[in-house]
Image (cartoon, rainbow, N blue to C red):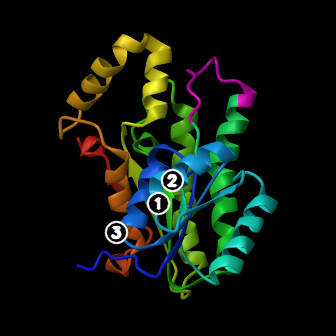
Amino acid sequence: MDMTLRGKVAVVTGGASGVGLGIAQEFAAHGAQVVITDLDRSDLDRAVGQVGGSCTGIVADVTDLAAMDSVYREVESDYGRLDVVVANAGIGAHAPLGHITEDQFERTFDVNVKGVLFTVQPALPLLRDGGSIVVIGSTASVRPPAGMSLYGGSKAAVRCLVRAWIQDIKGSGIRINVLSPGAVDTPSLRRAAEQAQGADAVAPLIRAMGEGNPTGRIADPREIGKAAVFLAGDAAGFVTGVELFADGGMAQV
């Protein structure tokens, strides 16, 4: 199976850390020219150094359509083509029913749903036959823990969008798939654990999360990146509209 991305140009939103950074690193390792977007220039510069190769970074907010249009104009000017889009940028607001605020609702759906639309739609004119769009979902769309209805609902929404979008673009040769991780060992997960239970509890909590998984552990961001490489590349040329769970089997049991 040919897993190379040589010659392909890829945009990864939310690529400065966590899963997005892991995807960008794997794309670069497989030969792609990678453009990452995020909100903070210093975070982007640090991530570009970690990715290496021909990676570049553009400051952009996925909830701002004009900003995303500008990203794609810059990509077209610099590279003259676009082959892969990964709609990864997302946030999670945790609150149980009865305590969900209007701000939490609006911000979660703005970033996780509207942000996906504003990432995908303006990219379409640049993508050509053989292009691939990977939307990052979550196992929370089908197995939302208590207190995560907003996050899980937003990820279920983008799954539904993709089901319709593959029909809208029928005949274009562009594929759209959902890649849904479970728990991933990211800095944001560790920060959340520390804030909730203190620094000494982080490592035991990560281990406990892994013990509930059929693999006995949680994922590394670059493992999600490897799955994204498959969906982005020619090896998945007849794969569209699927939701690939890269979760160690957690959503299957």
**For the residue labelled by badge 1, is the local secondary structure a helix, a strand or a loop?**
loop
In this view, the residue farthest toward the right is: 66
Q: Are marks 3 and 2 in contact (CB under 8 Å)?
A: no
In the rendered image, the vertical position of residue 43 relative to residue 201, given as above or below: below
Q: Is residue 92 visible?
A: yes
Dividing the picture into quarters, in which one does residue 169 lie? bottom right
> Is 240 displayed left or right of 168 in the figure?
left
The quarter of the image holding the N terminus is bottom left
Which x, y percent locates residue 3?
30, 74
- Badge 3 or badge 2: first in the primary sequence: 2
Dividing the picture into quarters, in which one does residue 42 lie? top right
Q: Are marks 3 and 1 in contact (CB under 8 Å)?
A: no
Closer to us: 44 or 65: 44
Q: Residue at x 24, y 46 (%)?
A: 249
Question: What span is colored magenta in the figure?
Answer: 92-103
> Can you tell which mark lies on residue 52?
1
In the rendered image, the vertical position of residue 32 relative to residue 172, given as above or below: above
Q: Which residue is mark 2?
A: 49
In the rendered image, the vertical position of residue 85 relative to residue 81, given as above or below: above
Q: Are marks 2 and 1 in contact (CB under 8 Å)?
A: yes
> Can you tell which mark lies on residue 230?
3
Closer to us: 49 or 145: 49
